[in-house]
Image (cartoon, rainbow, N blue to C red):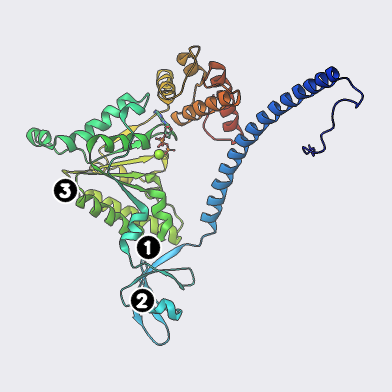
Amino acid sequence: MTDTVDDVELPYDDGASKQEKIESLEERLEVLESQNEDMRDKLLDANAENNKYQQKLERLTHENKKLKQSPLFVATVQELTDEGVIIKQHGNNQEALTEVTEEMRDGLEPDSRVAVNNSLSIVKSLDDETDVRARVMQVDESPDVTYQDIGGIKDQIDEVRETVEMPLKNPEMFDDVGITPPSGVLLHGPPGTGKTMLAKAVANQTDATFIKMAGSELVHKFIGEGAKLVRDLFELARQHQPAVIFIDEIDAIASKRTDSKTSGDAEVQRTMMQLLSEMDGFEDRGDIRIIAATNRFDMLDRAILRPGRFDRLIEVPEPDTAGREQIFQIHTRTMSVADDVDYAALADLAEGASGADIKAICTEAGMFAIREDRTEVRMTDFREAYEKIKQEEEDEDVSRTFA
Ligand SMILES: Nc1ncnc2c1ncn2[C@@H]1O[C@H](COP(=O)(O)OP(=O)(O)OP(=O)(O)O)[C@@H](O)[C@H]1O
Ligand SMILES: [Mg+2]
């Protein structure tokens, strides 16, 4: 492997005839070409492997950072005194005196909002309220997922359209009949079955403003801020009617009460109370619909499920055989697939796979084709991809069964 161009040994003796020289050079060339081919294959494999580890690394680094980060609390500046700054913590309303640098002090005035750490030092100024808001919610005019991109859950799609899309499109129909349209739907089911996709497709279909908030983000960002963000969320929706509020991973803020009394739990409780009261106070809900999603239905506090809050609970299950076939077709739409690929057989093979698993299988099958220098993806690629994805899931010891 240390050969350089200069120290390549000639594969013949000086005394060899011209013909002999040519022959031995050709032989040598052939060997080198095949070695080169081998190395290229290995390189591709190594690259793919590297990619995978890179992704794992990123995930772990992110997780690690999240765990190490001590929580920040939100406080309001009360007074600037000679001894320091008096702040009042949100949540528990305690006042405290804290020292600040000159530089920081210049940027503060009574009523400024600041983020403080555990020891009540001011970490940063939070002047721009919309900034905090923007980080948690994304206002998306129209995501690009459509109903045609979702396979195997037709009944669920129909139900969501009927409860969310219809009232936004034809509110007068509900007026004429004299019923109040359902306020919201809760999608629940195992991971990777299309819940988030479905919510996005609704927003796409209705031209409504799509305001997305992930429950988990809300809880982890700023302690003392969750309830306010929920208020802001509904306010933002009112300003942008017609709007769909999508609360993904709602289990993060609406889990069953636990007995422990840590500040984190109390914070989650306050956030959930605010959510409940916003949903109850939703008298004139003509132009705002709520969709929430969770894969931890068992964890939800029953209060969130009372009538008038989520009127429809829609279970999004793992796809059945016909559903899997459809999802295979959807995810291979833009791939060049060989004639021998049998979608029904694939659907049978991938028993227990979720939509997200199927997508992974299709991408991996494409990788197998690329490794063999083909542009067409064959049935064998899909089979190998299935084995690989299945193995990976088993290695990661995911709790769900991928039979
Ligand atoms: N029914 C489906 N039809 C087509 N593709 C799907 C389906 N379900 C999942 N997928 C694929 O898996 C990806 C993840 O799906 P999605 O984010 O909607 O899952 P989810 O149900 O929200 O999962 P989680 O509970 O983990 O949030 C999608 O981007 C899509 O590529
Ligand atoms: Mg989701």
Residue type at the position of mark 2? Leu
**Dot 3 alpha-carbon crowd within 10 angstroms: few under 14, some 14 to 19, many 20 or more:** few
In this view, the mark in front (1 or 2) = 2
Q: Quadrant of the N terminus?
A: top right
Q: Is residue 121 above or below residue 134?
A: below
Q: CA distance from mark 3 to mark 1?
A: 27 Å
Q: Are marks 3 and 1 in contact (CB under 8 Å)?
A: no
* Residue farthest toward the right in the current orientation of the protein: 15
Q: Quadrant of residue 125?
A: bottom left
Q: Which residue is mark 2?
A: 108
Q: Amino acid at mark 3?
A: Glu
Q: Earlier in the sequence, mark 3 or mark 1?
A: 1
Element assignment for label 2: loop
Residue lying furthest front: 18
SS class, disc 3: loop
On the image, the x and y values in percent for residue 349 come to 52, 18
Of residues 340 and 259, which is closer to you in this image? 340
Disc 2: CA contacts within 10 A as few (<14), some (14-19) or many (>=20)? some
Residue linked to disc 3: 283
